Image (cartoon, rainbow, N blue to C red):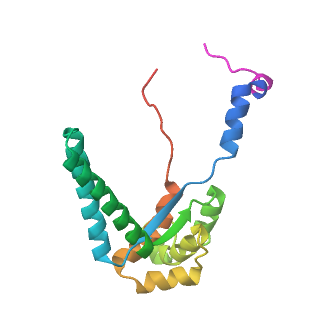
Amino acid sequence: MTTTPPATAVAADAHWAATRARLANRSRPTTTLTICDDPGLKQALADAEYHAKRTTAEAAEQADDKVAKARAATAKRDLTKAQQAFEDAAIRLRFQALPRPDFEALKKAHPPTEEQAEDGAAFDSETLAPALIAASSLDGMTEDDAREYLATWGEGEAVALWATAWNIQSHTRLDTELGKG
């Protein structure tokens, strides 16, 4: 039979006190949506990554081959340049999970239309999307900005924007050990 220790014992436990402090100081999950409008830069980066991986593996297999090592070093430099070119062109939008009560309140503030409710929707995604994007943006994106992007971007990119803000709300950083002991 397992007994629960008294609360005073748990409070006095240095390990639990340290764990509680760490739990209290955790930040909410964040994520980034990266946009690069230059397909050439994306392809150049992918090619440089592939080439660097391949030449590094070859150099490792041929440890005494100076030419293979030189090719690997060149490939790494090319990768660094391609990464920098991509970074210079990319737009990064950062999002953070809202505190759960805030997220629930935001969903309640955007109730489904009658038709949406009949289809089983719990909220109106048309009005919630720009509000959630703005509320979770770490870059200061406004609801008006979000509404404009959702209306004017191509469907895939608009969906990616909405999905990024939505998905971070349910992101988990847990690593559970199920079925052991």
Query: Where is 147 relative to 181, above or below?
Result: below
Task: Give residue 157's position: percent from left, percent from top.
Answer: 38, 75
The outermost residue toward the top is 1
Task: Give residue 113's position: percent from left, percent from top.
Answer: 50, 77
Q: Quadrant of residue 62?
A: top left
Res 111 seen here:
no
Query: Where is 21 relative to 6, above or below?
Result: below
Residue drawn at x 58%, y 67% is 136
Res 66 seen here:
yes
The outermost residue toward the front is 66
Residue drawn at x 47%, y 82% is 149
Q: Nearer the viewer, residue 143 or 41?
A: 41
Magenta segment, prevailing SS (helix, strand or loop): loop
Q: Nearer the viewer, residue 151 or 108?
A: 151
Q: Quadrant of residue 80?
A: bottom left
Q: Is residue 66 magenta?
A: no
Q: Is residue 144 left or right of residue 102?
A: left
Residue drawn at x 72%, y 20% is 5
Give the residues in magenta: 1-10
Looking at the rendered structure, the number of numbered marks drawn on it comes to 0
Q: Nearer the viewer, residue 113 or 149?
A: 149
Task: Give residue 176's position: percent from left, percent from top.
Answer: 48, 35
Task: Give residue 126's position: percent from left, percent from top.
Answer: 48, 78
Q: Quadrant of residue 65?
A: top left
Screen quadrant of the N terminus: top right
Q: Nearer the viewer, residue 111 or 38?
A: 38
Query: Where is 14 relative to 63, above or below?
Result: above
Q: Is residue 9 magenta?
A: yes
